[in-house]
Amino acid sequence: MSTVNTVGTGYTAADAANTATRATKKQLGQDDFLKLVTVQLAKQDPMKPMEDTAFIAQMANFSALEAQNVLAKEMGYLRADTQMQAASNMLGREVTVATKDGDVTGIVDSVSADSTSVYVNVDGQKYAFSSVTSVKPAPVPAAEVPAA
């Protein structure tokens, strides 16, 4: 195995290959943070250890970030649930949906969802819930209209 001499760090060609094949992350996770802290503690000067306050501050910042990520995820679930409930209330109602070809009006016959969006099915066509521009009560069939 060949060794790349980089200021005595012991960095080898195998390490370089491992780094090249690793996927790039956009943000650090809990495991990454714990690895960094472990390396930081292992590499610190025993005569000048990291102050407890700095370590506690890092842990507090990470805990706050983790809580913020959980909150954002839960808010996403809440938004999806709210949209599904609102779309379900449109069943049997007349809606107008904005499309790139113009507005479409019809009766909502079903509602569906995938991992990213909620959809209303109008006269057999699937449209994004967010494209609904108006909702009206279901039209009353002529046979049910009381005679005057």
Image (cartoon, rainbow, N blue to C red):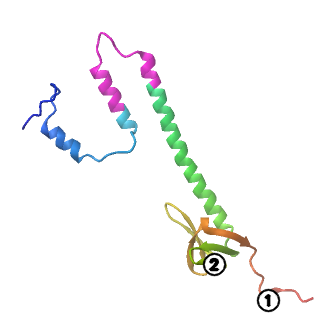
Magenta highlight range: 34-57
Decide which of tag 1 and tag 2 comes sooner along the chain: 2
Please check the rendered image and state whether residue 50 is part of the magenta-colored stretch, yes or no: yes
Q: Give the foreground label among 1 and 2.
A: 2
Tag 2: residue type?
Answer: Val
Relative height, residue 116 to residue 138 (above, below): above
Residue sitting at the far right: 148
**Location of mark 1 (residue):** 142
Q: Quadrant of the C terminus?
A: bottom right
- Is residue 42 rendered to the left or right of residue 146? left
Q: Residues within 10 Å of mark 2 (few under 14, many from 20)?
A: some
Residue sitting at the far front: 101
Where on the picture, by quarter, is residue 9? top left
Please check the rendered image and state whether residue 54 is part of the magenta-colored stretch, yes or no: yes
Tag 1: residue type?
Answer: Ala
Q: Residue at x 54, y 63 (%)?
A: 117
Labels in figure, total: 2
**Location of mark 2 (residue):** 104
| Towards the viewer: 85 or 94 | 94
| Towards the viewer: 11 or 35 | 11
Residue 95 in percent (x, y) is at 68, 74
Measure the alpha-carbon separation of dots 1 and 2.
23 Å
